[in-house]
Image (cartoon, rainbow, N blue to C red):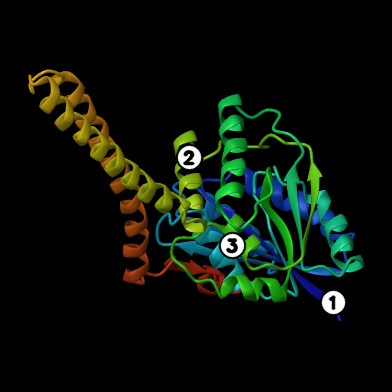
Amino acid sequence: MIRTLSIIVPCFNEEESIPLFYQEMEKIREGLPYRFEYIFVNDGSGDNTLKVIKEIYQEDKNVRYISFSRNFGKEAAIYAGLQHSTGELVTLMDVDLQDPPELLPEMIGLLKTKKIDCVGTRRADRKGEPKIRSFFARQFYKLINKVSDTKMVDGARDFRLMTRQMVDAVLELSEYNRFSKGIFSWVGFETEYISFENRERQAGETSWSFWELFNYSINGIINFSEVPLNIASLIGGLSCLFSGVALIFIIVRALIFGDPTSGWPSMVSIFLFVGGMQLLSLGIIGKYLGKIFLETKKRPIYLVKETEKDSPSEGQEN
């Protein structure tokens, strides 16, 4: 009996990349004893992404697709793909071919021989990436591994091969605020990583700006660490301590030297400093409260507009 390998492919405005990706994957499929189940997730694209996916579906019924009602983000697309996958093995891949398809046979072999639950991939370097983005990415991994009990591998990609058991465990975490790199690590299944040289996109342009990646990193820290809250508490405690010391100093000085009006500029500076620390602390707390607010709403992670089941077969087309 031929086993099934589910391939989850999030897509957002990737009409140029999809045919190239499919062609490369079909070359790999010929050398593997698996039936490929492609699951393309159209994340509210504004171009012809869905049309291109439908054209491939008409030629290959191993292709499935999920089209969202709007853009819900890559995390939602990953979750949807995992929910709809049926294979004994499941892999996540970017459609822009920055994730090398030729690594799949090696990953499958490693999964079998070592009897592990997941084979992840990581970039050996960041060649071709803007220097400022590389710098902040490295700092993010250093920071999150210091402040969180959930360890994450620097340069890790979403591209990974997982057993069905691990996929089912990931799906148990149905939280609205998702950070998949952390979730894959948090579930705790045995994972090994293989490295590859960084690759450029084969077509199209990235939809990730620097600020989107920065915000994504902040969300990752908040989702997997309480340290920012502890920092806010520490700032509050230190502010109270310094304010108390300053108050005692001012009273003693006034009693000994008189002239209580001197030092007005320094007092204003202290007030501004303490006020800034308070606003910073409130901002940190507000970030966590915002996450709690979204969770308590219990909104769906994504909404599906259509799937391949809604598409007419070739014989039904007029």
Along the viewing direction, whichever of 191 and 267 lies nearer the viewer: 267
SS for dot 3: helix
Residue 254 sits in quarter? top left
Q: Residues within 10 Å of mark 1 (few under 14, many from 20)?
A: few
Q: Quadrant of the N terminus?
A: bottom right
The type of residue carrying mark 2 is Phe
Specify which label sits upstream in the sequence, 2 or 3: 3
In the displayed orientation, state which residue is furthest to the bottom. 1
The type of residue carrying mark 3 is Ile
Q: Residue at x 84, y 62 (%)?
A: 108
Question: Could you tell me residue 127's position as x and y percent?
Answer: 71, 29
Q: Is residue 279 left or right of residue 69?
A: left
Q: Is residue 233 left or right of residue 249?
A: right
Q: Residue at x 45, y 36 (%)?
A: 211
Along the viewing direction, whichever of 256 and 95 lies nearer the viewer: 256
Question: Could you tell me residue 111's position as x and y percent?
Answer: 84, 65
Q: Residue at x 26, y 36 (%)?
A: 245
Q: Is residue 274 left or right of residue 215?
A: left
User: From where the camera sits, is residue 63 visible?
Assistant: yes
SS for dot 1: loop
What residue sits right under mark 3 in the picture?
Answer: 183
Question: Could you tell me residue 86's position as x and y percent?
Answer: 67, 76
Give the numbered dot on residue 214.
2
User: From where the camera sits, is residue 47 visible?
Assistant: no
Specify which label sits upstream in the sequence, 1 or 3: 1
1 or 3: mark nearer the eye: 3
Image height check: is 157 above or below 124? below
The type of residue carrying mark 1 is Ile
Question: Could you tell me residue 278's position as x and y percent?
Answer: 27, 42
Give the numbered dot on residue 2.
1
Q: Residues within 10 Å of mark 2 (few under 14, many from 20)?
A: some
How far apart marks 1 and 3 lie (CA) works out to: 30 Å
